[in-house]
Amino acid sequence: MPASDKSATTPLRAAAKKERGTSQAMAGLRPEQVAFLGEYTDTSTDKSVFVQILCWPTIPAAWPMLTQSIDSLNRLRGELPGPGIAPGASWLQSVAPQLCTPLERELGAAETTLAALIRRLPVRFAVALVEHPTGQSSGSGTVRYRSLFSGCLSAYGAFLKSSNQPACRVMIAPGPASDEAQQHIYEEMRPHLDHADRVGRLELAFWPEATLPLPLEIAQLAAAAVGRHLQQPKQANPLFDTVRAHLAPPSRFHALSRKTRLK
């Protein structure tokens, strides 16, 4: 295994050992066999928004490329003079602190820089969302997660069918511990997905540490960009534009990305 592959999988394996069940799901994985599941929730305005995004690599070198890009940014930006920006000064820092670290001295341009970084990554996204007026019941968490999982994984299955790419073996979601309720919902609905034969035995696991892997920060950032677009659709959102262009059909917003590129 190349050194870059080892560096990409070592943190995954080390953290997986801390949580029962996750270590079994991640044993012997190569970087290209790992997908990441980002989530975003906002109930602060007149509309409650729940977003889930699945992010997966399209070539084996995708996650090592991400690590190399951030290392290069750290070396380049670390040489710039002046103090850094205080943590928490931007929503970007709260969602993706490691991705923002090399951009602290130019936080005004951070969103554009991160959008350009994602644009160059060989990854794809599938998005699912649930919206309802704040104060109006959206049903149980079971119904919501069933809808989110189904939306993401149906689009992922369609991508696998059209590309003939093998499915990842595990998708990693943020969480200090395995969420048994989500696991149960996922295992129950997985056999009934569109293209379930393509998705195969893709397992759901939870990252047991507060510091997330860089690909999971990418997934979290993408989910937040979509959520912020839904809450403020007229506001400039370069991250959303980039994520939309990387969406696998039939994800929501996918058809719009073609019109955007033709302008």
Image (tube, grey):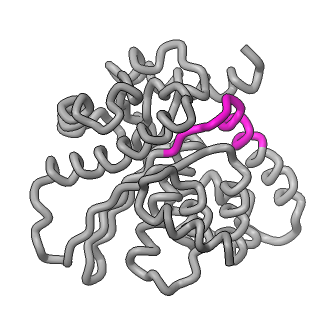
Identify whether 177 is placed above or below 45: above
- Image quadrant assignment for residue 82: bottom right
Q: 133 left or right of 195?
A: left
At a point 56% along the width and 35% down the height, the residue shown is: 163
Whether residue 183 is visible, yes or no, is: no
Q: Nearer the viewer, residue 114 or 129?
A: 129
Tell whether position 56 is magenta.
yes
Left or right, residue 143 beside residue 94:
left
Residue at 51 percent across and 45 percent down: it is 55
Q: Position of residue 32 (x, y in %)?
A: 60, 28
Q: Of 85 and 217, which appears nearest the observer? A: 217
Residue 183 vertical placement versus 151 (above, below): above
Rendered view: 145 above or below 260: above
Q: Looking at the figure, which quarter contains the N terminus?
A: top right
Q: Which residues are magenta?
A: 55-68
User: Does the image show residue 243?
Assistant: yes
x, y percent for residue 107:
69, 72
Magenta highlight on residue 219: no
Measured as percent of width and height from the top left, residue 84 is found at: 73, 68
Quadrant of the frame with the C terminus: bottom right
Percent position of residue 125, x then y? 51, 50
Q: Residue at x 21, y 35 (%)?
A: 189
Residue drawn at the location 25% of the way across and 83% of the way down: 46
